[in-house]
Amino acid sequence: MRSRDLLFIPAPQGYACVGPCFVTGREYQTTGIITARMIHDYQNGAHVQHAFPDLSAGDREFIISGTSPEGWKILFPPESEDEGLDHEEYPTPTVDVDILTATGPL
């Protein structure tokens, strides 16, 4: 899902993505460098991590969902003070997976 309220605007070194955070309602602007080619690739179907490989995870999440790093912290607060997240970090989901191996033709 791509946020409809976000705009790519000229910035000193290319473009920035700006718009209201879906969670906080406050305006947020990406801080990494975005080129016209990156915008073109994204708008034509490239996955955000491929179109904007040098942006922070927080900036890419903002482009995808309209949720700023501050909004992410509100949605997924740390469980304790020791687990506080900075601007660049997101919790990594953990999944226990049992690996099955085939012993014959399928």
Image (cartoon, rainbow, N blue to C red):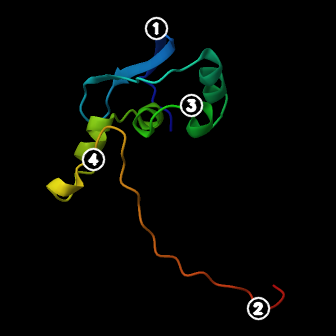
Q: Residues within 10 Å of mark 3 (few under 14, many from 20)?
A: many
* Separation (CA) of disc 1 from disc 2: 59 Å
Dot placed on the residue nearer the N-terminal end, 4 or 1 = 1
Q: On the image, numbered disc 2 is attached to which residue?
A: 103
SS for dot 1? loop
Vertical comparison of 58 with 38: above or below:
below
The quarter holding residue 46 reads: top right
Q: Amino acid at mark 3?
A: Phe
Dot placed on the residue nearer the N-terminal end, 3 or 2 = 3
* Separation (CA) of disc 1 from disc 3: 17 Å
Q: Amino acid at mark 2?
A: Thr
The disc label shown at residue 12, or none: 1
Kindly report which numbered mark, 1 or 2, lies closer to the viewer in this rendering: 1
Q: Residues within 10 Å of mark 4 (few under 14, many from 20)?
A: some
Estimate the x, y position of residue 59 in percent, counting from the top left. Answer: 42, 32
Dot placed on the residue nearer the N-terminal end, 4 or 2 = 4
Indicate left or right for 16 with 89 as reference: right
SS for dot 4? loop
Vertical comparison of 29 with 85: above or below:
above
Residue at figure coordinates x 57%, y 34% from the top left: 53
Quadrant of the snapshot with the C terminus: bottom right
Q: On the image, numbered disc 3 is attached to which residue?
A: 52
